Image (spheres, rainbow, N blue to C red):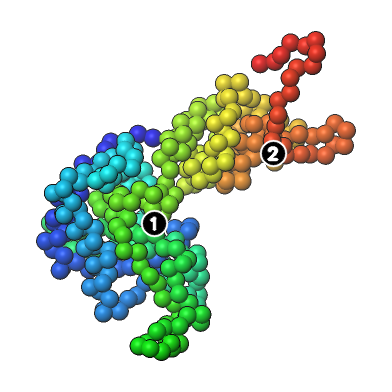
Amino acid sequence: MESEPSAFDVFLWANEVDEIKNNVSVELFLFTKSYTPFKVRYSDKLTASVKAMFMQEAVSYVIKEADKGLECREYEKSDGEDKVIYKTDLKNVARAETLLNLIEHEYSDIDYFSDDAYEFKKIKGIIAKFTYPGGNGTKTFYVAKGLSASAALKGATSWELNGESFEPFAAELALKMPEDNQVVIVDGTVVIFNQTKFEALFEYDYKSQVLADEKAKEIEQKYKLSFAEGLTLNSLLQSKKPLLKKVQGIDLETSMTGDQLVSYADEVQVELMTDDDGAIIIMDDKDLSMFVNLLNEDYYVSPVSGLRYEIKSKKLLSAPDGEPPRG
């Protein structure tokens, strides 16, 4: 995957936001491990705290550290250097892009989070949407942080210390917010303050993504595939690392042709679907697993019992005595 590096200037952005910090509005969203967002109401008494923890920490860090040699480099060309924050295009980070699209374009359909209706253990992170007047309209940026299950305190099992006395915990649920800077998203650019937490928050693995893109191109050059709307081969491979690893081990130059693959599926009685044009239909990751397993010749019908098997691990045996080796 290659894309033009973003021209976004994080230092210019930080100074601009610092100037108008008293005029920003902020809205909070929790999001699940499947990147479904939920609106979150918060008390006016928390407004200053929300701005401080999500906006001012990041902005102050960039401004202060700029004088100490802080650099902003392309994420894909750097790794773990000191005094460096990273940036990448939002379009490279599919899960972050999906999350923002839902917030921006499906806002009216987003529910408010309640621990009675939903389970906090399914929550992956929190994202703050900041807006402020600028230019000819409204400017927007986001700050995202990961949340762990240990960040939540249940009222039923927690006590609060009031002076010298323990008392029942007043709230149903309390959250300890992360204080560190993690991810800012602005003008189509993802700014990464903490590489490890960014990768965990949006399940972004650049090396796997590059490999998935490369393998997807090779497979689609040889096989005619038809995907359900919204799905692509490389996005499916990125989300299924075991499949990506298996595909990496397949020699596509010597693998079966499309017709041979369909015949093999019939032989082992695997329900591989094709459309009227002969393209192999991939509706979900289960169909992709079946396709990759067929490519890897992982299905076997016993000539003795007639039973079908999916082979989880294969060990190539040496040629029998007196026969030349194959391959």
Amino acid at dot 1: Leu
Residue 82 sits in quarter: top left
Mark identifier at residue 99: 1
Q: Residues within 10 Å of mark 2 (few under 14, many from 20)?
A: few
- x 66%, y 34%: residue: 294
Q: Quadrant of the N terminus?
A: top left
Chain-order first, disc 2 or disc 1: 1
**SS at mark 1 in the image:** helix
Q: Are marks 2 and 1 in contact (CB under 8 Å)?
A: no
Residue 295 locus on image (x, y percent): 63, 31
Task: Please say if 199 is above or below 158.
Answer: above
Mark identifier at residue 312: 2
**SS at mark 2 in the image:** loop
Residue 326 locus on image (x, y percent): 70, 15
Residue 195 locus on image (x, y percent): 35, 48
Residue 179 locus on image (x, y percent): 31, 64
Residue 64 sits in quarter: bottom left
Observer able to see residue 70 = yes
- x 48%, y 69%: residue: 120
Q: Nearer the viewer, residue 290 or 14?
A: 14
Task: Please say if 108 is above or below 286.
Answer: below
Q: Residues within 10 Å of mark 1 (few under 14, many from 20)?
A: some
